[in-house]
Amino acid sequence: NNKHLWDRSMKLTPLDAPGYEKVVYAEDEASGLKSIIAVHSTKLGPAAGGCRMFAYPDLDAAKTDALRLARGMTYKNAAASLPLGGGKSVIIADPHKDKTPELMQAFGRFVESFEGMYTTAEDVGISVEDIEEAAKFTSHAAGLTKGEYASGDPSPVTARGVYLSCMAALKHAFGNDRIEGKTVALQGLGHVGMYLAAHLHEAGASLVVTDIDAHAVAQARQKFSARSVAPNDIYDVDADIFAPCAMGAILNADTIERLKVKLVCGAANNQLADDTAGDALLAKGIVYAPDYVVNGGGIINVSAEILKITDQKWVDQKVELLAVTTDKILTKAKALNASP
Protein backbone atom coordinates (compact mmCIF):
# COMPACT_ATOMS: atom_id res chain seq x y z
CA ASN A 1 0.00 0.00 0.00
CA ASN A 2 1.56 3.27 -1.19
CA LYS A 3 -0.30 5.29 1.40
CA HIS A 4 2.18 4.41 4.14
CA LEU A 5 5.15 5.35 1.97
CA TRP A 6 3.53 8.73 1.50
CA ASP A 7 2.80 9.16 5.19
CA ARG A 8 6.51 9.00 5.89
CA SER A 9 7.64 11.34 3.13
CA MET A 10 5.06 14.04 3.80
CA LYS A 11 5.49 16.09 6.92
CA LEU A 12 2.23 17.49 8.37
CA THR A 13 2.47 20.30 10.91
CA PRO A 14 -0.63 21.73 12.64
CA LEU A 15 -0.55 25.54 12.64
CA ASP A 16 -1.96 27.65 15.45
CA ALA A 17 -5.01 29.64 14.34
CA PRO A 18 -7.53 30.66 17.03
CA GLY A 19 -11.10 30.56 15.74
CA TYR A 20 -10.31 28.00 13.04
CA GLU A 21 -11.17 24.31 13.31
CA LYS A 22 -8.06 22.86 11.67
CA VAL A 23 -5.05 24.39 9.90
CA VAL A 24 -2.19 22.20 8.68
CA TYR A 25 1.07 22.86 6.82
CA ALA A 26 2.33 20.06 4.58
CA GLU A 27 5.85 19.68 3.25
CA ASP A 28 6.63 16.86 0.83
CA GLU A 29 10.26 16.47 -0.07
CA ALA A 30 9.78 14.10 -3.02
CA SER A 31 7.44 16.41 -4.99
CA GLY A 32 8.52 19.75 -3.51
CA LEU A 33 5.00 20.45 -2.24
CA LYS A 34 4.63 23.18 0.37
CA SER A 35 0.96 23.73 1.14
CA ILE A 36 -1.51 24.88 3.77
CA ILE A 37 -5.09 23.68 4.18
CA ALA A 38 -7.21 25.89 6.44
CA VAL A 39 -10.64 24.81 7.65
CA HIS A 40 -12.48 27.72 9.25
CA SER A 41 -15.90 26.18 9.94
CA THR A 42 -17.80 22.95 9.31
CA LYS A 43 -20.90 24.15 11.11
CA LEU A 44 -23.08 24.10 7.97
CA GLY A 45 -21.39 21.07 6.41
CA PRO A 46 -17.99 19.85 5.23
CA ALA A 47 -15.65 22.70 4.30
CA ALA A 48 -15.29 23.53 0.61
CA GLY A 49 -13.09 26.07 -1.12
CA GLY A 50 -10.55 26.30 -3.91
CA CYS A 51 -6.82 25.85 -4.00
CA ARG A 52 -4.63 28.82 -4.88
CA MET A 53 -1.07 28.50 -6.18
CA PHE A 54 1.01 31.60 -5.61
CA ALA A 55 4.67 32.41 -5.06
CA TYR A 56 4.20 33.66 -1.50
CA PRO A 57 7.34 35.32 -0.06
CA ASP A 58 7.17 33.17 3.08
CA LEU A 59 5.05 30.78 5.13
CA ASP A 60 3.53 33.61 7.14
CA ALA A 61 2.17 35.34 4.04
CA ALA A 62 0.75 32.04 2.80
CA LYS A 63 -0.90 31.36 6.16
CA THR A 64 -2.44 34.85 6.31
CA ASP A 65 -3.93 34.38 2.84
CA ALA A 66 -5.19 30.85 3.55
CA LEU A 67 -6.88 31.96 6.80
CA ARG A 68 -8.51 35.00 5.21
CA LEU A 69 -9.74 32.99 2.23
CA ALA A 70 -11.05 30.11 4.38
CA ARG A 71 -13.05 32.49 6.55
CA GLY A 72 -14.39 34.17 3.40
CA MET A 73 -15.60 30.78 2.17
CA THR A 74 -17.65 30.25 5.34
CA TYR A 75 -19.56 33.45 4.52
CA LYS A 76 -19.67 32.77 0.79
CA ASN A 77 -21.15 29.29 1.20
CA ALA A 78 -23.63 30.57 3.79
CA ALA A 79 -24.62 33.56 1.61
CA ALA A 80 -25.30 31.21 -1.31
CA SER A 81 -27.35 29.00 1.08
CA LEU A 82 -25.18 25.94 0.49
CA PRO A 83 -24.87 23.15 3.09
CA LEU A 84 -21.09 23.60 3.13
CA GLY A 85 -18.57 25.07 5.55
CA GLY A 86 -15.56 27.28 4.84
CA GLY A 87 -12.08 26.09 3.92
CA LYS A 88 -9.30 26.96 1.52
CA SER A 89 -5.88 25.73 0.50
CA VAL A 90 -2.76 27.43 -0.80
CA ILE A 91 0.32 25.99 -2.47
CA ILE A 92 3.53 28.00 -2.12
CA ALA A 93 4.88 27.84 -5.67
CA ASP A 94 5.04 29.78 -8.93
CA PRO A 95 2.23 28.43 -11.14
CA HIS A 96 4.23 29.23 -14.29
CA LYS A 97 7.44 27.51 -13.20
CA ASP A 98 6.99 25.04 -10.37
CA LYS A 99 3.88 23.11 -11.34
CA THR A 100 4.25 19.37 -11.96
CA PRO A 101 1.83 16.42 -11.96
CA GLU A 102 3.77 15.02 -8.96
CA LEU A 103 3.25 18.25 -7.02
CA MET A 104 -0.51 18.19 -7.63
CA GLN A 105 -0.72 14.48 -6.81
CA ALA A 106 1.06 15.13 -3.50
CA PHE A 107 -1.44 17.92 -2.87
CA GLY A 108 -4.24 15.39 -3.51
CA ARG A 109 -2.77 13.14 -0.83
CA PHE A 110 -2.64 16.10 1.55
CA VAL A 111 -6.35 16.81 0.91
CA GLU A 112 -7.15 13.13 1.47
CA SER A 113 -5.49 13.30 4.92
CA PHE A 114 -8.40 15.56 5.99
CA GLU A 115 -10.73 12.58 5.48
CA GLY A 116 -13.59 14.53 3.90
CA MET A 117 -13.50 17.50 6.25
CA TYR A 118 -12.31 19.62 3.28
CA THR A 119 -13.03 19.44 -0.47
CA THR A 120 -10.79 21.33 -2.89
CA ALA A 121 -11.35 22.88 -6.34
CA GLU A 122 -9.77 25.44 -8.72
CA ASP A 123 -8.70 28.91 -7.69
CA VAL A 124 -6.04 31.41 -8.83
CA GLY A 125 -3.11 29.61 -10.47
CA ILE A 126 -4.86 26.23 -10.55
CA SER A 127 -6.56 24.71 -13.60
CA VAL A 128 -9.07 21.91 -14.11
CA GLU A 129 -6.14 19.71 -15.27
CA ASP A 130 -4.29 20.38 -12.00
CA ILE A 131 -7.30 19.35 -9.92
CA GLU A 132 -7.60 16.21 -12.06
CA GLU A 133 -4.03 15.28 -11.07
CA ALA A 134 -4.89 15.83 -7.39
CA ALA A 135 -8.08 13.78 -7.81
CA LYS A 136 -5.99 10.70 -8.60
CA PHE A 137 -5.18 10.62 -4.88
CA THR A 138 -8.28 12.09 -3.25
CA SER A 139 -12.02 11.67 -3.64
CA HIS A 140 -12.46 15.17 -2.17
CA ALA A 141 -11.72 17.26 -5.26
CA ALA A 142 -14.35 19.02 -7.36
CA GLY A 143 -14.47 21.17 -10.49
CA LEU A 144 -13.65 18.18 -12.66
CA THR A 145 -14.61 17.75 -16.31
CA LYS A 146 -15.02 13.98 -16.17
CA GLY A 147 -17.32 11.87 -14.04
CA GLU A 148 -21.03 11.53 -13.41
CA TYR A 149 -21.38 14.79 -11.46
CA ALA A 150 -18.49 16.69 -13.06
CA SER A 151 -19.17 20.44 -13.00
CA GLY A 152 -16.18 21.57 -15.08
CA ASP A 153 -14.54 24.99 -14.98
CA PRO A 154 -16.42 27.17 -12.44
CA SER A 155 -15.13 30.45 -13.96
CA PRO A 156 -17.99 31.21 -16.41
CA VAL A 157 -20.54 30.57 -13.67
CA THR A 158 -18.68 32.87 -11.27
CA ALA A 159 -18.58 35.58 -13.96
CA ARG A 160 -22.31 35.26 -14.59
CA GLY A 161 -23.06 35.66 -10.88
CA VAL A 162 -20.86 38.77 -10.69
CA TYR A 163 -22.53 40.21 -13.79
CA LEU A 164 -26.08 39.61 -12.49
CA SER A 165 -25.16 41.04 -9.08
CA CYS A 166 -23.63 44.06 -10.76
CA MET A 167 -26.89 44.63 -12.64
CA ALA A 168 -28.77 44.43 -9.31
CA ALA A 169 -26.36 46.90 -7.69
CA LEU A 170 -26.67 49.47 -10.50
CA LYS A 171 -29.93 50.94 -9.25
CA HIS A 172 -28.44 51.42 -5.78
CA ALA A 173 -25.50 53.35 -7.23
CA PHE A 174 -27.11 55.16 -10.17
CA GLY A 175 -30.86 55.01 -9.61
CA ASN A 176 -31.32 52.97 -12.81
CA ASP A 177 -30.19 49.57 -14.00
CA ARG A 178 -28.73 50.58 -17.36
CA ILE A 179 -25.26 49.19 -17.94
CA GLU A 180 -25.24 50.43 -21.55
CA GLY A 181 -22.87 53.36 -22.00
CA LYS A 182 -21.30 52.99 -18.55
CA THR A 183 -17.56 52.61 -18.17
CA VAL A 184 -16.15 49.72 -16.17
CA ALA A 185 -12.56 49.70 -14.87
CA LEU A 186 -11.78 46.00 -14.77
CA GLN A 187 -8.76 44.79 -12.80
CA GLY A 188 -7.57 41.30 -13.72
CA LEU A 189 -8.26 39.33 -16.90
CA GLY A 190 -7.87 35.79 -15.58
CA HIS A 191 -10.49 33.11 -16.17
CA VAL A 192 -13.31 35.00 -14.44
CA GLY A 193 -12.26 38.53 -15.44
CA MET A 194 -12.25 37.63 -19.13
CA TYR A 195 -15.73 36.06 -18.98
CA LEU A 196 -17.04 39.06 -17.03
CA ALA A 197 -15.55 41.42 -19.64
CA ALA A 198 -17.48 39.51 -22.32
CA HIS A 199 -20.79 39.91 -20.44
CA LEU A 200 -20.21 43.63 -19.88
CA HIS A 201 -19.11 44.26 -23.46
CA GLU A 202 -22.15 42.41 -24.81
CA ALA A 203 -24.42 44.53 -22.62
CA GLY A 204 -22.94 47.73 -24.08
CA ALA A 205 -20.50 48.82 -21.39
CA SER A 206 -17.14 50.44 -22.23
CA LEU A 207 -14.15 48.67 -20.70
CA VAL A 208 -10.86 49.93 -19.34
CA VAL A 209 -8.76 46.92 -18.40
CA THR A 210 -5.49 46.03 -16.75
CA ASP A 211 -3.55 42.84 -16.09
CA ILE A 212 0.09 41.91 -15.53
CA ASP A 213 -0.34 39.46 -18.42
CA ALA A 214 0.18 41.47 -21.63
CA HIS A 215 -1.32 38.69 -23.75
CA ALA A 216 -4.61 38.84 -21.82
CA VAL A 217 -4.70 42.63 -22.19
CA ALA A 218 -4.15 42.36 -25.97
CA GLN A 219 -6.97 39.83 -26.18
CA ALA A 220 -9.40 42.12 -24.31
CA ARG A 221 -8.46 45.09 -26.48
CA GLN A 222 -9.11 43.09 -29.61
CA LYS A 223 -12.24 41.21 -28.52
CA PHE A 224 -14.00 43.91 -26.48
CA SER A 225 -12.50 47.13 -27.92
CA ALA A 226 -11.19 47.75 -24.41
CA ARG A 227 -8.79 50.54 -23.48
CA SER A 228 -5.91 49.40 -21.28
CA VAL A 229 -3.90 51.06 -18.51
CA ALA A 230 -0.90 50.08 -16.39
CA PRO A 231 -1.82 47.92 -13.34
CA ASN A 232 -1.36 50.70 -10.79
CA ASP A 233 -3.38 53.21 -12.86
CA ILE A 234 -6.65 51.28 -12.78
CA TYR A 235 -7.74 53.06 -9.57
CA ASP A 236 -7.46 56.48 -11.23
CA VAL A 237 -9.61 55.70 -14.25
CA ASP A 238 -12.58 57.96 -14.90
CA ALA A 239 -15.16 55.17 -14.73
CA ASP A 240 -18.61 54.41 -13.32
CA ILE A 241 -17.83 50.97 -11.94
CA PHE A 242 -14.67 49.36 -10.55
CA ALA A 243 -14.56 45.57 -10.99
CA PRO A 244 -11.68 43.98 -9.07
CA CYS A 245 -11.10 40.47 -10.47
CA ALA A 246 -7.52 39.78 -9.40
CA MET A 247 -5.97 39.45 -5.95
CA GLY A 248 -7.67 40.57 -2.73
CA ALA A 249 -7.03 43.34 -0.19
CA ILE A 250 -6.83 45.98 -2.95
CA LEU A 251 -9.32 48.40 -1.40
CA ASN A 252 -7.44 50.39 1.22
CA ALA A 253 -7.30 54.04 2.34
CA ASP A 254 -4.97 54.96 -0.54
CA THR A 255 -6.79 53.23 -3.42
CA ILE A 256 -10.30 54.19 -2.21
CA GLU A 257 -9.16 57.83 -2.09
CA ARG A 258 -8.22 57.54 -5.78
CA LEU A 259 -11.40 55.88 -7.06
CA LYS A 260 -13.74 57.99 -9.20
CA VAL A 261 -16.48 55.36 -9.46
CA LYS A 262 -19.94 55.04 -7.89
CA LEU A 263 -19.98 51.24 -7.63
CA VAL A 264 -17.49 48.51 -6.76
CA CYS A 265 -18.54 45.05 -7.92
CA GLY A 266 -16.03 42.37 -8.88
CA ALA A 267 -15.01 38.74 -8.60
CA ALA A 268 -11.93 39.02 -6.37
CA ASN A 269 -12.05 37.45 -2.91
CA ASN A 270 -11.50 39.59 0.21
CA GLN A 271 -11.42 42.91 -1.63
CA LEU A 272 -11.40 45.05 1.51
CA ALA A 273 -7.92 45.36 3.03
CA ASP A 274 -9.43 45.74 6.51
CA ASP A 275 -12.61 46.65 8.36
CA THR A 276 -12.13 50.38 7.85
CA ALA A 277 -12.21 50.02 4.05
CA GLY A 278 -15.97 49.37 3.98
CA ASP A 279 -16.60 52.55 5.97
CA ALA A 280 -14.23 54.53 3.74
CA LEU A 281 -16.24 53.48 0.66
CA LEU A 282 -19.48 54.43 2.40
CA ALA A 283 -18.07 57.84 3.41
CA LYS A 284 -17.12 58.46 -0.21
CA GLY A 285 -20.59 57.52 -1.43
CA ILE A 286 -19.39 54.44 -3.30
CA VAL A 287 -21.75 51.45 -3.29
CA TYR A 288 -19.91 48.22 -2.47
CA ALA A 289 -21.44 44.92 -3.59
CA PRO A 290 -20.08 42.40 -1.04
CA ASP A 291 -17.54 40.15 -2.74
CA TYR A 292 -18.50 36.98 -0.87
CA VAL A 293 -22.05 37.28 -2.23
CA VAL A 294 -21.42 38.35 -5.82
CA ASN A 295 -18.62 35.86 -6.49
CA GLY A 296 -20.52 32.84 -5.15
CA GLY A 297 -21.25 31.39 -8.62
CA GLY A 298 -18.13 29.27 -8.80
CA ILE A 299 -18.68 27.55 -5.48
CA ILE A 300 -22.36 27.01 -6.34
CA ASN A 301 -21.25 25.23 -9.52
CA VAL A 302 -18.65 23.18 -7.64
CA SER A 303 -21.12 22.42 -4.82
CA ALA A 304 -23.48 20.74 -7.30
CA GLU A 305 -20.66 18.28 -7.89
CA ILE A 306 -19.89 17.86 -4.17
CA LEU A 307 -23.59 17.40 -3.36
CA LYS A 308 -24.08 15.16 -6.44
CA ILE A 309 -26.74 17.33 -8.07
CA THR A 310 -27.06 16.95 -11.86
CA ASP A 311 -29.87 19.45 -12.47
CA GLN A 312 -28.36 22.50 -14.22
CA LYS A 313 -31.47 24.50 -13.26
CA TRP A 314 -30.48 24.11 -9.58
CA VAL A 315 -27.19 25.89 -10.32
CA ASP A 316 -28.82 28.59 -12.46
CA GLN A 317 -31.44 29.42 -9.82
CA LYS A 318 -28.85 29.60 -7.03
CA VAL A 319 -26.68 31.91 -9.16
CA GLU A 320 -29.67 34.14 -9.98
CA LEU A 321 -30.44 34.33 -6.26
CA LEU A 322 -27.02 35.95 -5.69
CA ALA A 323 -28.34 39.08 -7.41
CA VAL A 324 -31.44 39.03 -5.19
CA THR A 325 -29.25 38.68 -2.09
CA THR A 326 -27.01 41.54 -3.30
CA ASP A 327 -30.10 43.73 -3.74
CA LYS A 328 -31.40 42.83 -0.25
CA ILE A 329 -28.06 43.54 1.44
CA LEU A 330 -27.62 46.89 -0.32
CA THR A 331 -31.23 47.88 0.49
CA LYS A 332 -30.69 47.05 4.16
CA ALA A 333 -27.27 48.79 4.28
CA LYS A 334 -28.85 51.95 2.86
CA ALA A 335 -31.70 51.87 5.37
CA LEU A 336 -29.17 51.55 8.22
CA ASN A 337 -26.71 53.96 6.57
CA ALA A 338 -24.09 51.28 7.17
CA SER A 339 -21.43 49.61 5.10
CA PRO A 340 -22.77 46.37 3.57
Image (spheres, helix red, strand yellow):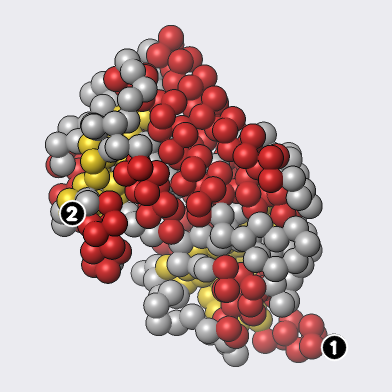
Q: Amino acid at mark 2?
A: Ser
Percent of width and height locating residue 223: 29, 56
Question: Disc 1 on helix, strand or loop?
Answer: loop
Question: Disc 2 on helix, strand or loop?
Answer: strand
Please name the residue that numbered disc 1 is placed on.
1
Q: Earlier in the sequence, mark 2 or mark 1?
A: 1
Percent of width and height locating residue 267: 42, 45
Q: Is residue 244 left or right of residue 73?
A: left
Q: Residues within 10 Å of mark 2 (few under 14, many from 20)?
A: some
Mark toward the viewer: 2 or 1 = 2
When asked about the image quadrant of residue 57, the answer is bottom left
Q: Is residue 47 left or right of residue 321?
A: right
Percent of width and height locating residue 105: 64, 79
Q: Residue at x 32, y 44 (%)?
A: 201
Q: Are marks 2 and 1 in contact (CB under 8 Å)?
A: no
Residue nearest the viewer, comparing 192 with 290: 192
The N terminus: image quadrant: bottom right
Inter-mark Cα distance, 2 to 1:
54 Å
Q: Amino acid at mark 1?
A: Asn
Outermost residue, top direction? Answer: 335
Please name the residue that numbered disc 2 is placed on.
228
